[in-house]
Image (cartoon, grey):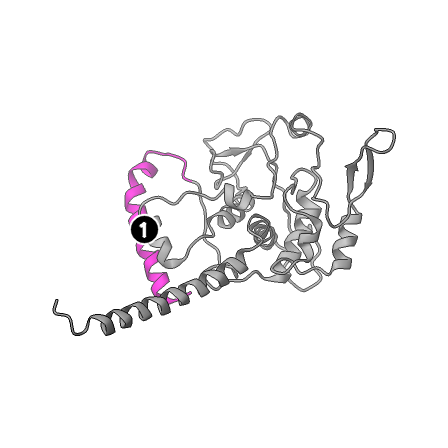
Amino acid sequence: MSTMIKMVRALTAAAALAVAGPALAAGDHKPNIEEYSWSFAGPFGTFDRGQLQRGFKVYQENCAACHGLNLVAFRNLAEEGGPSFSEDEAKAIAADYTVVDGPDDFGDMFDRPAILSDRFPSPFPNEQAARAANNGAYPPDFSLLAKARAAKRGLPWFLFDPFTQYAENGPDYIVSLLTGYVDAPDDLEVPDGQYYNDAFLAGQFISMAPPLFEEAVEYTDGTPMTVEQYAKDVAAFMMWAAEPHLEERKKLGFRVMIFLIVFAGMLYFTKEKLWRNVAH
């Protein structure tokens, strides 16, 4: 991160604290959302393939029992710009899932192993079943969650974000939420079936139990097996699921900017040549 970006963020943080001072003094709940370093940040950022594969593993082992991934197909796991699984690996992953297909020649639906063209099936047959299994709460689908749950950044941050290229508020919030399960203040009573989380946007209490624990998922590449690392890895995977063409978009944006700069230069020199002898 450049020195200029650090200075801008420091100034915006100071200004925000000044604005938020009265609200905090009044005892209002302010979500504790941290900013993290991401490989895909900035105009030239790219996804870390190893992190995406680790994040997928965390999703499979800790999240898939409750949260679907309905907009992602198994073939996407092997496409360019994603986790970079081989086609055989993607096929093996798909084969572990069962999807409903049909109707057959008799008009009946049937179950079969998933193939590359299938999307990740939902862990529940319908919303009612999902709520019944989760104490009335509906686990959201993960496909677009990294975009849909992005914490809003008010004044003055949004004035500087276009210059610092900050667009990772969704993953930042996800990591803060997954690591935000802390002991509640002594004067605060936590309702039955809920948990205190100091990063939850909707309030201080959340129905989802802490999903991550130290060394719960085994990494074979030497990456630390900590709750924070698990949270960062699965948040990066969710960011890819929400925007699988992020790298392609950034490359295209850079080419467009170069084109516009060259085109503007050509227009300027054309204007100078055509009008240089005309009095203004």
Q: Is residue 8 magenta?
A: yes
Q: Is residue 51 above or below residue 182?
A: below
Q: Quadrant of the N terminus?
A: bottom left
Q: Which residues are magenta?
A: 1-30
The reply to whether residue 173 is visible in this rendering is yes
Number of marks in picture = 1
Q: Is residue 124 above or below residue 264?
A: above
Q: Nearer the viewer, residue 164 or 35?
A: 164
Residue labelled with disc 1 = 159
Spot occupied by residue 214 in the image (x, y as percentages of width and height):
64, 51
Query: Farthest right residue?
Result: 106
Q: Is residue 241 above or below residue 205?
A: below
Spot occupied by residue 185 in the image (x, y as percentages of width and height):
47, 36
For the stretch drawn in magenta, the main secondary structure is helix
Spot occupied by residue 252 in the image (x, y as percentages of width and height):
49, 61
Q: Nearer the viewer, residue 174 or 238?
A: 238
**Element under disc 1:** helix
